[in-house]
Amino acid sequence: MNYRIGDIVTGKITGIQPYGVFVLLDDQHQGLIHISECQHGFVKALDELFAVGQHLSVVILDIDEFSGKISLSVRALQPDPAMTTYRHRKHYWTNRKLHVGFKPIAEHLNGWVDEYSALLKKHSVD
């Protein structure tokens, strides 16, 4: 077998089942595109996406060396729609309109120090 994981090959669809699509790679080798590897997102019916006799490019995901089964993917060749439409929004922990800086920390710092000093003294005495 000349195929390796990661190879992009062209094959011909020989059968469509509810769980996947069978693709003939050459005269001796056939692979399966599992329904989860057919496209990004939900797949309602494979016969709406593919037709027997159709030629398509696929990526070899896995080759079982004992059984010789080849796992294929069409989805790996498509851009991920979640990655192309993602827009990062900056998150602010404070109100952007107020410019207080570290002022609240400075105002409360002495009280926090006194509070924890009292706790430390209480626990060291016990």
Image (tube, rainbow, N blue to C red):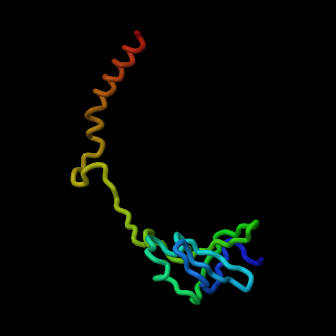
Give the mark count: 0
**Lateral position of residue 97 relative to residue 34, left or right:** left
- In the rendered image of this protein, does residue 37 appear above or below residue 120? below
The residue that appears at 49% across and 82% down in the rendered structure is 47
The residue nearer to you, when weighing 72 against 30, is 30
Task: Where is residue 92? Give x, y as percent.
Answer: 31, 53
Residue found at the very far top of the displayed protein: 125
The residue nearer to you, when weighing 15 against 6, is 15
Task: Where is residue 79? Give x, y as percent.
Answer: 49, 75
- In the rendered image of this protein, does residue 84 appear above or below residue 27? above
Residue found at the very far left of the displayed protein: 97
Task: Where is residue 118? Give x, y as percent.
Answer: 33, 18
- In the rendered image of this protein, does residue 98 appear above or below residue 55? above
Q: Quadrant of residue 120?
A: top left
Q: Quadrant of the N terminus?
A: bottom right
The residue that appears at 73% across and 76% down in the rendered structure is 3
The residue nearer to you, when weighing 91 against 20, is 20
Q: Quadrant of the C terminus?
A: top left
The residue that appears at 31% across and 31% down in the rendered structure is 109
Task: Where is residue 84? Give x, y as percent.
Answer: 43, 72
The residue that appears at 71% across and 80% down in the rendered structure is 29
The residue nearer to you, when weighing 14 against 55, is 14
- In the rendered image of this protein, does residue 54 appear above or below residue 105? below
